[in-house]
Amino acid sequence: MDVFVARQPVFTALKKIFGYELLFRLGLENYFPDVDGDVATSNLLSNIFFPFDFKEILGEKPGLINFTEKLILQMVPLLLPKKNFIIEVLENIEPDEKIISSLSILKEKGFTIALDDFVYHKKFRPMIELSKIIKFDIRATPLESLHEILHNLKSDYEILFLAEKVETYAEFEQAKEMGFDLFQGYFFSRPEVLSTKGISSGQITKLGLINEVGKRQLDLKKIEGLIKKDVSVSFKLLRFINSAYFTRRNSIDTIKDAITFLGTDELKRFINIVVISDLSSDKPNELVRTSIIRARMCERCGKVLNTNFSTDELFTLGLFSFMDAILDCRMETILSHIAFSEKMKKALLGQNKEFKIILNIVDIFEKGDWKNRIFDSISGKSLESKLPGFYIDSLKMADSFV
């Protein structure tokens, strides 16, 4: 049986990662809404420990997991480490005596309780008193209708309010002004401004470094010199080469040795990732992390699918697919400063069908959008069973950099 576990980031008002909601599916032919909730959560709990280590998925951040009424009454959350997981109480659970008793025990044991997709009614007050987080789906309950509810709840309880399905920066800013503390959605992966914003000279210099490693014949001495002149790049290179991503007994202490160990292909990837990281210094770290995840997954998918792109090209395309959001600038303007081939430029502009399909598969997998019909195209194929492993491998690479 193929196990699919994806995660969706939850941000603070400062756009820092608070935690991840974990999303689960037994296989591409059986998306979550058709799976019994008890079975789904039970399988999720089983599979974040085997075959996956939950720390590979969560790092040091907490994971939010949906629990059905039955699983709460059975006290299944007690199987989890309380410091690493937050209990999400599904919206269809009624606050009867047994549920309130079970949630009270879980809170006494030190668990954090969140109410999922909350719609206010006074009958839920006993639940609210036991909860630390309340989630509002702003697609189901528009922000404009929540002013009074948030105001009243904030005056009566010490609660963190989470706005779910925040897709634009305008929604993020509005929710923040209204008093929301946490934010879930992919607003971070979209440009804030797309009108006439240009590229600064410092950014052009960074893009110039990408051009240097984009040459067919690399001048390694020149690249070594450029890296040594940049403290940030030097530090990140040595941190990366000595990270858990590589299995090696002895540490590497010089830039020259690090370049030799990496080889030209890995060096190109490293430079591209570091430049993106530096260019997005005022953006959420999750934007860089997601760029790396995309890049690695595109590369791994390219080893299974027949395309006109090399795996190295697919890695670069995945990495640069968020560049408009990173620089808040149109992709056409960005590409005018990078010596990519016409094939690569067309792919980044959404004009190549092959790359568009690969990117959609990767993007939808990471979001846990299991209902999307694009998965029908790979059902029963080798890529289907390989995706979960690709995803975990990509998370490891991303965590080595960010």
Image (tube, rainbow, N blue to C red):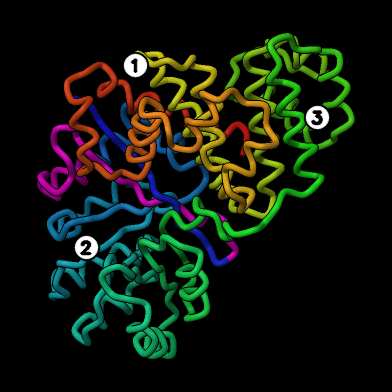
Q: Residues within 10 Å of mark 1 (few under 14, many from 20)?
A: few
Identify residue for label 1. 305
**What are the residue bounds of the magenta stretch?**
14-43
Residue 27: name its quadrant: top left
Q: Is residue 40 magenta?
A: yes
Residue 354 colored in magenta in the image: no
Q: Quadrant of the N terminus?
A: top left
Using the image, tell me which numbered label, if any, was put on residue 90. Answer: 2
Q: Nearer the viewer, residue 43 or 375?
A: 375
The disc, 3 or 1, on the residue closer to the chain's N-terminal end is 3
Which residue is label 3 attached to? 234
Q: Nearer the viewer, mark 3 or mark 1?
A: 1
Residue 297 horizontal side relative to residue 203, left or right = left
Could you tell me the amino acid type at mark 1? Leu
Q: Which residue is painted at 33% across and 40% down in the image?
A: 364
Tell me the SS state at disc 2: loop
Position in image of residue 188 (x %, y %): 51, 55
Q: Amino acid at mark 3?
A: Ser
- Tag 1 secondary structure: loop
